[in-house]
Amino acid sequence: MTLPAAIVSFLFSSAPAFADLKICNRMSYVVEAAIGIDDKAATATRGWFRIDPATCRVVVQGTLTADRILLNARALGVYGASPIPQSGRDMLCVAQDNFVIAAARQCRSGQTQAAFTQVTPTQGADGNLVAYLAEDSEYDDEQARLAGIQRLLVIAGYDAAPIDGVDGPKTQAALAAFLKSRGLSSDVAASPNLFKTMVDAVQTPSATGLTWCNDTPHKVMAAIATDDGKSVTSRGWYRVDPKTCLHPDVTGQPKQIFSFAEAVDADNRVVKLKDRPLNWGGDRQLCTRETKFETSEQTDCGARGFAPTGFGAVDMSSGGKTLRFAVP
């Protein structure tokens, strides 16, 4: 499945800041959110707050005094090549793992800049302040939860498309098959831990399809390419966190699959061992670039702003293949 571009929108109106601040997720993705507190001359950031579809999370407790509140949201790596674009104008510092940064406009080692969007939360019925994460599909809570389940089922290899937040026999059959394959009861479908269960399943090796597993202490950025007999399409980047696995989304039944991956440090620089990049690929030269990409044109990479990169062919003859990235 090729992921559609999700649009992050923030529903807001003016409200006094005197209660807890909550972020509510009406997207079909499990997200990690970071907030920025801009108060006079100082700007601080903190994150990451994991928020499942159709749920809310308190990110600031008690009275909040700030000139501006800013927000950044990212989807988990299981969803592939950065499905949530960031259009904010404030570039603030974040870290890969949970963080609190007191001076967030000048990044230090291990910190990178990310785009934050200013938000003005509304006051909810419970008296707390709330800001919503939403897609252009404008899901309500029930639709967001169902669309989130559909999306993870498709990534896990079950036919729950289209991802539209509409229930039906196809979605229910796919969910039942997923639960049965994991030895789980149907009660799990209503559990608040369902998304964790599904994400964990997508991040474990599978007997079908391609699985990447990162056995290194570094973050790995991976790209996939598929040959359908007419053209070769390369796509990336997928984030595979240390000690986790990931199933890249592959549509149809391609004749050949290719893979490339490289380890990067906290500043997103390529990790080197004995002056050689730590990567995993092969001899097939295909086009990539540093940012999110997808291209079916594999000639004149440099002239089109891409770089030729050595991909390795993946033997899928047994129906499933797990590629493990390890330090030599």
Image: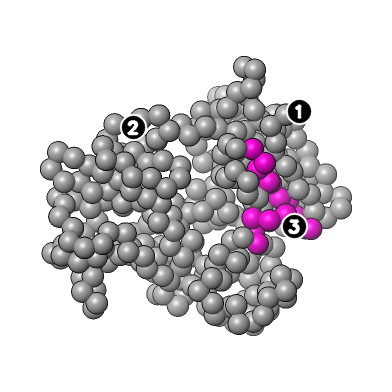
Q: Nearer the viewer, residue 313 or 36?
A: 36
Q: Is label 2 in contact with label 1 (beta carbons under 8 Å)?
A: no
Q: In the figure, residue 25 lies in which quadrant?
A: bottom left
Q: Determine which of the numbered discs, if any, sits on residue 206 in the image.
A: 3
Q: On the image, which quarter does residue 18 sit in?
A: bottom left
Label 2, secondary structure: give it: loop
Where, quadrant-wise, is the C terminus in this rendering?
top right
- Answer left or right for 126 relative to 174: left
- Residue 238 position, x and y percent, is 58, 45
Left or right: residue 102 versus residue 52 is left
Question: Callout 2 environment at 10 Å: few (<14), some (14 to 19), or many (20+)?
Answer: some
Q: Mark 1 is on which residue type?
A: Asp
Residue 176's x, y, as percent? 68, 78
- Please determine whether, in this image, residue 285 is positioned above or below residue 140: above
Mark 2 vs mark 1: in front: 2
Residue 148 seen anywhere in this rendered image of the structure = yes
Find out whether residue 213 is within the magenta segment: yes
Q: Which residue is mark 2?
A: 107
Q: Which residues are magenta?
A: 201-216
Badge 1 marks a residue whose secondary structure is loop
- Residue on which disc 1 sits: 283
Rendered location of residue 146, percent (x, y): 52, 74
